[in-house]
Image: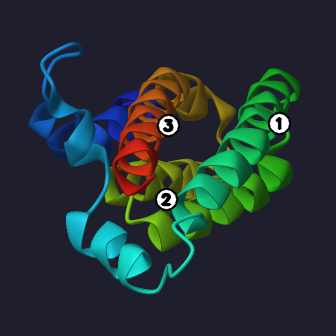
Amino acid sequence: MDQATLAVARAAPFLMSQAAPGTGAEHDALNAAVIDGLRSHDDSGSLLGEFLEAFVEDVGSYLDVFRTAVAREDAPTLRRTAQRLKVSARHLGASGLAALCGELESVGADGAPVPARALLAPVEEEVARVSGALRAASRRAA
């Protein structure tokens, strides 16, 4: 089995557990307990909005770096960037995104850019789900 197939196979349980786009599953992109914890420490009601703003600002850069690293077959940059986004995703309770970034991090550590190409689309889709869930959570907190 080639590296791309292995990477997609490792991510398959997560990918298969996700609802199809447009089915209202955006809330599943974030762990409700993490969001509730953030709300409980948010006296001003602005914390989720700040997280959303920071995430949206940063995530576009991460995705650009992923695309460039894959195109240039730059495994060290892919690994470092995936690790950073994985940590950010965990802090937000976006475990699905963190898992996919963990796969990208592993692929980067292996130095195999081909599997990373196979994982870029699922990462981009999950980023969109997380962004939508953060927007919804931020609106509810306001």
Residue 74 rendering spot, x and y as whole percentages: 85, 40
Mark 1 against mark 3, which lies toward the viewer?
3
Whole-angstrom CA distance, mark 1 to mark 3, is: 18 Å
| Residue 88 placement, left or right of 68 | left
Residue type at mark 3 is Ser
Residue at label 2? 102
Residue at label 3? 131
- Identify the coloring: rainbow
Residue at label 1? 65
| Secondary element type, mark 1 | helix
How crowded is the residue under tag 1: few (<14 C-alpha within 10 Å), some, or many (20+)? Answer: some
Residue located 81% across and 32% down the image: 73
In front: 129, or 83?
129
The tag earlier along the polypeptide, 1 or 3, is 1
Mark 2 against mark 3, which lies toward the viewer?
3
7 lies above or below 107: above
| Secondary element type, mark 3 | helix
